[in-house]
Amino acid sequence: MTLIKMSCRVVALLLFLPTAGWADEHHDQAMDAPDLDQLIAIARQMSPELAAAALESDAAAAKVAGADSLPDPKFQWQPMDIPRGADNYLPSQLPRTDKFFLQQEFPLWGKRDLKREIAEADAKKMAALRGVVENEVVARVKAAYAEYHEVHQAMDLDRELLPRLTTVARLASARYAQGVGSQQEATSAEIERTQLQTELLVLEGQRRTLKARLNTLIGRDPRAPIVETPHLRALPGDIELGDLTERALRLNPDLRAEDSAIASANKTADLAERGLYPDIAVTFGGVKSYGRFSGYEGMLEVTLPIRGDLHDAEIGAAKASAGAARSKRDAKELAIQNDLSEAYWSFETARKMEKLIVESSLPQARLGFESAQHAYAVGKGEFIMVLTAEQQWRKTHLDHLKAQLEQQIRLAEIEKLLGGEL
């Protein structure tokens, strides 16, 4: 047996030594990963954005209790009949008569009820906007987690390919040293191995960046530890765009916020029209004359809404604002339907692509790579075939990861538009 044949057989054995299967290895790594729900729960508790939105909602809710209260009463004191000095104009004695009054204004014609209803609508709007912020934060956490998973899977792929390429590079160098192979084969193998190492460094940088982004999204220090073995959440079964659209139009918090804005604007317009009706103010008090209580006095005041231009301007502005609120709601509904349609079809396309890759492209690419390795190891193949097969297998696997990532991101967008989990 020649030295060349022995070298080839040794390398062939190295290439096909039993190792943990790719699918089994990834499955084992995924088993100890925490559920994504835990990160979402942390974000709901610690996100500064959510905290600010919650406080704004609480502030709007706190205004409801006093929205229909009467204005603060006014106290009046009228000192009267104060004599002046004989030789100057300064007061010479204390007032001979004092009058003390309390005045209370009373808005009529249901104006106080309208103010309360406006405050309630504004509170509902802020509560819905809090839901909008929460959905946005949760969607970003889901997307970042999916990207984090993709990077880890890509790193696992490159770590598995690197020893194989190293073995191929050693075989190419051995063949060149023995005069069987060319120098180009040896250098090309080493270049490919170096490129794979460089790609691992790039992926490690992306991993650290995504780790910092995830921590920031859930309200923690960017350097805080994140699980090192992420796994994707399960995808839903068959979903219909019509069902999703119906649910989004019914539950989307953006639309609920717009509905509350319309209600507030309509009530504001009603209140402006009620400004054409007069309000009253009642004043009642006592009179103290020459040191003793001598009687009572009262007064009734009525506002006269005779400034037609002022009231017309207020009514016109309020009705225009109500119309604008309705138009915004219509525009938001169209935007949601459009975004939902785009996310749905992108999700379905990625699902079909993944199925094709898993059922056809990935097995064929893996088989082609292993066949090219074996042929080259026993001296029956060309190095360029190994290199081409390795690149094709890696590209196919990365396409698979991209299809998975696209599904996860689009699913997060769909759920954000729906206002909750599927």
Image (cartoon, grey):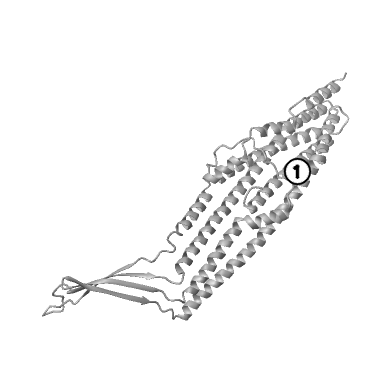
Q: Quadrant of residue 31?
A: top right
Q: Amino acid at mark 1?
A: Asp
Relative to 45, is 181 on the left or the right? right
Kindly state the secondary structure of the residue where label 1 is placed: helix
Looking at this rendering, what residue extends furthest in the top direction? 1
10 Å neighbourhood of mark 1: few (<14), some, or many (≥20)?
some
Q: Is residue 67 above or below residue 17?
A: below
Q: Is residue 357 above or below residue 255?
A: above
Q: Is residue 393 above or below residue 163?
A: below
Relative to 253, is 56 on the left or the right? left
Q: Quadrant of residue 203?
A: top right
Q: Is residue 211 visible?
A: no
Q: Is residue 139 visible?
A: yes
Q: Residue at x 65, y 55 (%)?
A: 248
Residue 24 screen position, x and y as percent:
73, 31
Q: In what quadrant of the picture does the N terminus appear?
A: top right
Looking at this rendering, what residue extends furthest in the front direction? 295
Q: Nearer the viewer, residue 372 or 187?
A: 372
Instruction: Please count the marks in the image.
Output: 1
Q: Is residue 5 above or below residue 135?
A: above
Q: Nearer the viewer, residue 9 or 367?
A: 367
Residue 313 screen position, x and y as percent:
50, 76
Q: Nearer the viewer, residue 203 or 39?
A: 39
Residue 35 screen position, x and y as percent:
62, 38
Give the residue at mark 1.
Answer: 399
Residue 284 screen position, x and y as percent:
30, 71
